């Protein structure tokens, strides 16, 4: 039994608790509150004068796929030879010994969704992982947790030099429609022919898209510009799948469209430069504008585009540009957990949830505050020396 005592607890799902206690047993939060007492024999961690939050979650990363300090040998982000690759699995390419996981833990980031890159129209399957251990199968919280797709410039820039399709936005959408139409037919045939005693020839690409059509997993669609966002929504409306909008750089221009469909937005990396035309109208106001319209917002670094340890900095800049501190905390914890489909386990400090939490030296939204301890499943994975 572990008792974290005396801290100001920001639960992300309810009111803050001043001078509270968090009790942890067998990797779970078993009690928390102002009136909770540390049982005899418990290991006590004194958090007096400090702040306790849920572990932070980055909903869009390439951690372990694009390893830091390794170069080409550690880059497994994009399979840049075929534009439709939904059968690829990020799980098969993640190296948990990527030094960026240390950076994440030191910054209080305990989980993320790892996605294939955006060089393809459909890049492969995502996975939600915790930032602990050496075996990715054990670190995985949800696999697959979605399928990555990309609108806009990236697929064009990948395949135009190869003189292959897509070289236009039209072709990107057409290839997307084609694989989804084939998957619809595949599902119909599977149900008709795949009963007991009947062999059925499997197609791994179409099976993966079938998971989306059956609403077992969502699409994660990369789109920066407002017109590309609308193409993503158009495809969603045509095929009826669930999705999150990734990056959503010009989401502030079409916030009502996202809100009316209940599509969440994973916004960022706002701290990057305007290094391509799609980022020309980037603004730190986007999270606040989307939230005001009723869109569920998470904030991302898109690591390694912006290093993972800058996640809290990105949230602070969103606060400076109109996002409330309450929604900023949710954008780093509860909202990404909900968007990623793992909120029954992580994203807030509640009885019965995993003991993934962070102790801060002061207000987490003050850049001068430090992470003094990070815990995953009740185990200390980082402690200030």
Image (cartoon, grey):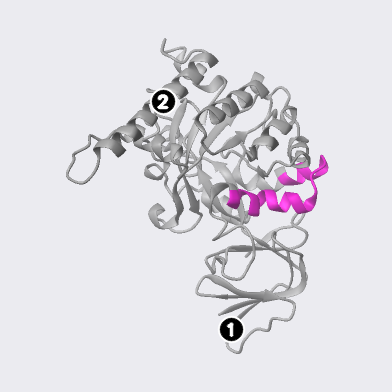
20 lies left or right of 346: right
Question: Most prominent secondary structure in the magenta stretch?
Answer: helix
Percent position (x, y) of residue 122? 45, 29
| Sequence-first tag of 2 and 1 | 1
- Between disc 2 and disc 1, the foreground one is 2
In terms of secondary structure, where does tag 1 sit?
Answer: loop
- Residue on which the image places disc 2: 181
Q: Height in image: 144 above or below 87?
A: below
Q: Which mark is drawn over residue 141?
A: none
Q: Quadrant of the N terminus?
A: bottom right
Q: Is residue 149 magenta?
A: no
Extreme residue in the front direction: 192
In the rendered image, the quadrant that contains the C terminus is: bottom right
Tell me the quarter of the picture where residue 275 sits: top right
Rendered image quadrant of residue 51: bottom right
**Is residue 22 among what the camera can see?**
no
Of 100 and 228, which appears nearest the observer? Answer: 228
Q: Is residue 303 above or below residue 334?
A: above
Between the C-alphas of marks 2 and 1, the distance is 58 Å
| Mark 1, residue position | 42
- Residue at 65% of width from left, 32% of height from top? 248
**In the displayed structure image, the side of residue 303 where residue 49 appears, left or right:** right
Q: In the picture provided, is 379 more to the left or to the right than 317?
A: left
* Residue at the outermost bottom position: 40
Looking at the image, residue 211 sits to the left or right of residue 54; the answer is: left
Q: Residue at x 64, y 65 (%)?
A: 349
- Give how far across and how far down residue 202 sits, in percent: 26, 36
Whether residue 319 is visible to the viewer of this picture, yes or no, is yes
Q: Nearer the viewer, residue 263 or 87?
A: 263
Q: Which residues are magenta?
A: 315-338
């Amino acid at each position: 039994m572990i008792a974290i005592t005396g801290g100001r607890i920001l639960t992300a799902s309810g009111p803050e608790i001043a001078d509270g206690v968090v009790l942890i047993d067998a990797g779970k939060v078993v009690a928390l509150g102002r009136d909770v007492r540390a049982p005899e024999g418990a290991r006590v961690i004194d958090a007096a004068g400090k702040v306790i939050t849920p572990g932070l979650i980055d909903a869009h990363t390439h951690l372990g796929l694009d390893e830091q300090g390794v170069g080409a040998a550690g880059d497994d982000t994009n399979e840049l030879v075929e534009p439709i690759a939904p059968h690829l699995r990020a799980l098969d390419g993640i190296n948990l010994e990527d030094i960026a996981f240390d950076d994440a833990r030191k910054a209080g980031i305990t989980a993320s969704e790892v996605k294939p890159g955006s060089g393809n129209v459909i890049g492969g399957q995502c996975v939600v992982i915790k930032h602990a251990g050496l075996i990715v199968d054990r670190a995985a919280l949800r696999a697959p947790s979605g399928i990555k797709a990309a609108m806009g410039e990236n697929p064009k820039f990948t395949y135009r030099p190869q003189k292959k399709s897509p070289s236009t936005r039209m072709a990107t959408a057409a290839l997307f429609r084609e694989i989804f139409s084939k998957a619809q037919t595949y599902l119909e045939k599977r149900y008709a022919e795949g009963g007991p005693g009947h062999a059925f020839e499997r197609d791994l690409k179409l099976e993966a898209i079938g998971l989306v059509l059956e609403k077992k997993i969502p699409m994660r669609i990369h789109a920066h510009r407002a017109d590309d966002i609308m193409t993503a929504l158009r495809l969603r409306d045509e095929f009826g799948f669930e999705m999150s909008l990734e990056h959503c750089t010009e989401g502030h221009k079409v916030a009502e469209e996202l809100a009316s469909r209940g599509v969440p937005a994973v916004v960022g990396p706002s701290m990057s430069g305007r290094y391509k035309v799609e980022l020309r109208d980037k603004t730190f106001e986007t999270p606040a504008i989307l939230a005001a319209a009723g869109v569920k917002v998470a904030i991302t670094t898109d690591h390694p585009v912006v290093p993972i340890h800058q996640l809290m900095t990105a949230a602070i800049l969103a606060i400076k540009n109109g996002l409330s501190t309450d929604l900023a905390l949710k954008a780093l914890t509860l909202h990404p957990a909900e968007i990623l489909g793992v909120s029954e386990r992580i994203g807030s400090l509640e009885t019965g949830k995993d003991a993934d939490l962070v102790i801060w030296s002061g207000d987490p939204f003050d850049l001068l505050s430090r992470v003094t301890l990070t815990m995953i499943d009740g185990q200390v994975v980082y402690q200030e020396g």
